[in-house]
Image: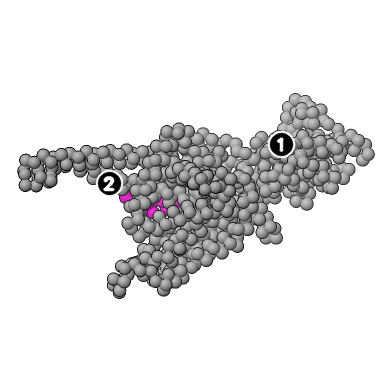
Amino acid sequence: MLAVVVVSLLAVAVQAVLWERFRQPLWYDELWRPHFVAEPPGTFWSELSVANTPSAIGSMGLLRVCGDVFGWHAWALRLPSAVPLVALAAGTWLLARRLTGRTAAFTAALTVTLGGTVVDLASQVKPYTLDATCALAVVMLWMRAASTTRALLWSRFAVGVLALFSLPAVFLIVPLTVVDVARPLPGPYGWAGRRTAARPAARRAFRPTVRAAVRAALCDAPAAVIAGLHAALFVLHQSGQRASTFWDDHFLAGRGLPDGIRFIADQLAATAAGAPPGIDRYDPNLVHPLTDSSDPAVIVLGCAVAITFLAGVVTLARRPDGRVLLVATGGAELMVLAASAGRYWPFGAVRTNVFLVPLLTVVAAAGAAALARTARVAWAGAGVAGRPGDGPSGGDPAGGRAAGGRAAGWRRTAAGLLAAVTAVTVLAAAAVPAAAVSALHPLWEERGDRRPIDLMVDATVTARRLHRPGDLVVVGGRLARAGWLYGMEVSQDGASDDRTPGQDAAGQSTAGQDAPAANTAGQGPTRQDAPGQERPGGPGADVVTGPVGPRVPRSSTVFLTAIGDGGVGRALTRRAPGPEGRVLLFVLAYDRRGTGHALDEARAVGWCPAWTHDFELTGTLRVLTPCGHRADNAG
């Protein structure tokens, strides 16, 4: 119990130290999730069909509860990721302690809990720490010895409920159910069930029967049915990512046999070389262990983890609860590989597979402990001398002593080599926790750093200050819609900087002048420039003054998935504002290359840029007013 408290407090402490990380604005990879979660019932289902990646209904519900209870602030929305890190620490210890010694269990818990990449994920609006915690709970519930059928059914029902909160839980449940049904094990209630005195010989015979298989299927049905229905009815509706190319490097789909074998081998090697094993090693927006920058270190750690993992497989296969963990881990890897063949789920050491990290770590820790015991025994054996008469000469005492001495020497040498090799492997594996913790250094150094598209809320706040009735908002960029809608319709965070410097159409700073048509309490601008007139530049910074106006409705907003392909011109032709209106054009940073063409399209239909502000790493907001000839006609 003391160890559980210690690792849990460590999880709390590391997040408290990095609290600044939790207060940073939401960035692109986080923005879209609260947008879909906050959608009203009337549009929730249709919006969900274009989600970037699928989410479990339970994790979305937790996010919605945090937003409704604590407010739609960045720190509040990160709670469903931060809190599970504490449970993950405790769960890793409990599972590892059940299967191995205290030292190995504590090391496994520290490796997972203080792994910098894991802590980084816990500080973002992403479900991966929750997934890892649920994976531990699924495995431990499946190991649980049930005294009655009713208790077993309730245990499986609890597993099914966990699948509602963690999408990848289905990857664990399916192989565990298949093995239960295909090969009923001794004991009346599954893998860890207790033997009874009745028919002991038949139970030990380990002969599957149709009746036993049906019974196992019925007992596991609550978990399998709940997880299956959730995946079929809710998750598959969110399969838009199949058309994206983002995960192509981690999909088995489209590969021939030689390339497929090479792909699997590469991904398994990358999984073994992670610290902790299985952690993401590809996402450039996550911190990674310092050892990842050294190829020799990666190779040494990968080989050590592979050896300890294989030793863990051999060790755990000898016990029923260990086999549960092995089936869950290996079966999940196979399920993920199959899903990647259909472009449903990426395979390998990527962030979506963090749910496997604590399971892989526990297996490797159990193997390291077993190897350490082997090394001690081998080392002790290396110092044991042969006894007289042990050799093949038998009746010849002198010859027996000589032959026995040679044999004993060979045994001592072999035992010494075994002990040395095993000790080196264990020591190399012992470096994995240090490598995992090393990722906390860059996380600390970057705790206040900017991330891509993290000023979207600032952009929407500025747009609300500028917008007035009759204006049209045009938002361009393939990935802009969800983040803009979250900032405009949901977020309760203010702009990170209320001063918004801008430039006029000539590229000059709008010196100490009023912002273009700044909104004052929704009653119109404090000042309006002449239509089509470009304001002169000057010293100082322009400040968008006045309170933040009302949220701009979707009916006044046009979303374009591409910039520079004629979309801006078509939008302004179809929905041009009236004579007193203007256009607020926002272009996402990823799509800026098409800005020049988009502005040419706008000029062609009579709209010219009058004011510009660049939101670093996020995008550019422009105010377009009628060009000179358009203004004259409107006069």
Q: The disc labelled 1 sits on which kind of residue?
A: Arg
CA–CA distance between discs 2 and 1?
60 Å
In this picture, is 543 found above or below 200?
above
Instruction: Look at mark 1 in the image and give the residue it sits on.
Output: 592
Q: Main secondary structure of the magenta part?
A: helix
At x 36%, y 63%, the residue is 192
Residue 36 x/y as whole percent: 64, 53
At x 31%, y 48%, the residue is 370
Query: Which residue occupies the foreground of this view, 251 or 455?
Result: 251
Rendered image quadrant of residue 521:
top right
In this picture, is 489 found above or below 409?
below
Is residue 118 visible to us here? no
Residue 488 x/y as whole percent: 70, 47
Count of numbered circles in the view: 2
Residue 92, magenta (yes or no) = yes
Query: Which residue occupies the foreground of this view, 238 or 347?
Result: 347
Instruction: Look at mark 2 in the image and give the residue it sits on.
Output: 373
Query: Which residue occupies the foreground of this view, 264 or 437?
Result: 264
Residue 310 x/y as whole percent: 37, 48
| Left or right side of 557 for 274 | left
Is residue 303 visible to us here? yes
Find the magenta span and give its range: 88-102
Q: The disc labelled 2 sits on which kind of residue?
A: Arg
| Left or right side of 103 for 445 | right
